[in-house]
Amino acid sequence: MGMTITEKILAAHAGKSAVEPGEIIDVKLDLALANDITAPLSLEEFDKVGAKGVFDRDKVVLVLDHFTPNKDIISAENCKTIREFAHKYGITNFYEGGACGIEHALLPEEGLVLPGDVVIGADSHTCTYGAVGAFATGVGSTDLTYGMVTGTLWMKVPESIKFVCHGKWQKWATGKDLILHIIGRIGVEGALYSAMEFHGDAILALSMDSRFTMANMAVEAGGKNGIFHVDKKTEEFVSGRAKRPYKVFESDKDAKYREVHDIDVGKMGLQVSLPFLPSNAKDVREVRNTAVDQAVIGSCTNGRLEDLSIAAEILRGHKVAKGVRCIVIPATPKIYREALDRGYFEIFLDAGCIISPPTCGPCLGGHMGVLARGERAISTTNRNFVGRMGHPESEVYLAGAAVAAASAIKGEIVHPEEVL
Amino acid sequence: MILKGKVWKFGDNIDTDIIIPARYLAYTDPKVLGSHCMEPLSPDFHQKVAKGDIIVGGSNFGCGSSREHAPIAILALGIPLVIAKSFARIFYRNSFNKGLALLEADIVDKVKEGDVLEIDLSAGRIKGAGIDVVAKPIPSFMIELINEGGLMNYLKKRLETRA
């Protein structure tokens, strides 16, 4: 019996020739990641077990991206603790200050996650790295401690679900629209404990940025990981960034899938997910009379250059509606500089946007764009749960950058063609 | 181990932002986390619950982020067990790592808030309020891990042996 790409990567890291879904294996890790909200708990456990160091100082990554620039004293104290840990144990990849970006945009950009890797991160959106053909999954702080100390972690081999996507993309549609559409179709637990594997001509046509967006939201369908095959675009992205060798895996033709879904992206309009679940996906044209107080264009899901370039194209020569706060958050310092060099900042500033430093901030209602009671946001982030961006009686509508930018101009949720 | 506790009912897709909103994630003190547990749905939840009470939920309980603050917040209120139709995977692992027991059983529509249930954890048997069901067995690997005293005890032993 053939194996899927996920099974092959896991087998290779467990020292086995084959693995099957459901099997419990101990896998070797290529990278273990934590951030400023998950590392503190992890470091408490690290001290409690009496660990003397990490398994490999080049393979532990600490990114201070959530409540930074430090939002309050306790956040600052947490960052200080992590900084001291990083220095004490000589952690090579410790990111803070002006070197810091949103972890799931930063790590691929830095060439830290590569095809064929097994990556764990104490952050549920660690699954983002599946875009480069890696197995990457989110874990809690305790599992992360185990991984950070031993370089291994137990895993249950997931079943795989195949999504075959074909057809011609509609104007403005990106990976965000497709992943919202898929989650809408299978539900927030449609891929529970499973691997989501993306195939088809429509996937080959997608940019790397869009693939990161899709893999990022696998967890919103309950998925353990989302994964793409390596193609020319992946190779182009990875070469020049990779500082170590990597191995490319691909699914066998006779690999076993729990389900196969066929999706024609040509029939898919721009998507908006209504509160309070990412699975409440609708065509933006079905969303009427929905005024917004805030538009957020950023996050580990959609804070990359493709997103900023779409936002700039739509916002050029327009003004953000009176009373609407449009917050643009380039995800990393490199993206920030590139957006500046391309002239996007001038467009955003002329339109009346707020340009934020890289931070997860508003996505999780942390800071830099928290909602008041009764307020509503259109956001390119990944979750629209109750109170996600602030007050329990506020609302988040999820969309791609095109709908978010157009809605900021109109002051209500609209398709870009209504403002252009 | 036998647990007996009063039921607090929650629905489907109880996400980690409900269990503990992200704005409290800078805190690691269980007491602080417990005092905000379930706040978006029930701001005074921490005052209403008593030690030994149990949570009963629907499907996909614990979906969302990887924050271990979620099981810590529940445990801080003295709640030893969550019974739900299904659990999100990261929450599942985190709960076992933190010592919060989870049982998979579809009883949310069969119980009322305030019902008292008696649970034989090792057998997974849930009795009371007119029901008598056996939960889906806990994977044997997880039981071995529990018998080792949890993942961190296992790691501690491993490190001591190495030293």
Image: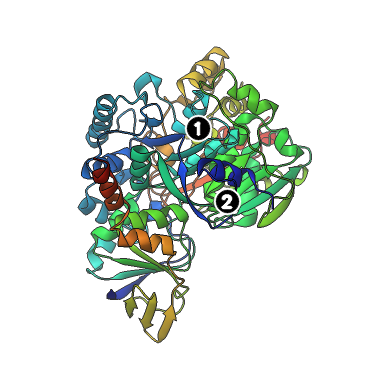
Three-letter code, disc 1: Gly
Badge 1: chain ID: A
Tell me the residue at 70%/42% (across/down): A199
CA distance for labels 1 and 2: 38 Å
Alpha-carbon neighbours of circle 1 within 10 Å: few (<14), some, or many (≥20)? many
Q: Position of residue A52 (x, y in %)?
A: 25, 35
Position above or below: A414 against A88: below
Q: Quarter-wise, where is residue A268 in the image?
A: top right
Q: Residue at x 54, y 50 (%)?
A: A223
Chain identity of mark 2: A
| Type of amino acid at the residue the image marks with label 2 | Val
Instruction: Check the image and report above or below for B151 versus A95.
Output: below
Quadrant in which the C terminus of chain A is drawn: top right
Near-viewer residue (A60 or A213): A60
Pinpoint residue B17: horizontal percent, then vertical percent: 39, 51
Q: Is residue A38 left or right of residue A235?
A: left
Numbered label attached to residue A298: 1
Residue found at the very far bottom of the displayed protein: B130
Dot 1 or dot 2, earlier in sequence:
2
Rendering colour mode: rainbow
Per the image, label 1 sits on a secondary structure element best described as loop
> Residue A151's x, y, as percent?
39, 38
Q: Compared to B106, does B23 lie above or below?
A: above
Q: Position of residue A351 (x, y in %)?
A: 54, 23
Question: Which residue has dot 2 on it?
Answer: A19
Q: Quadrant of residue A22?
A: bottom right
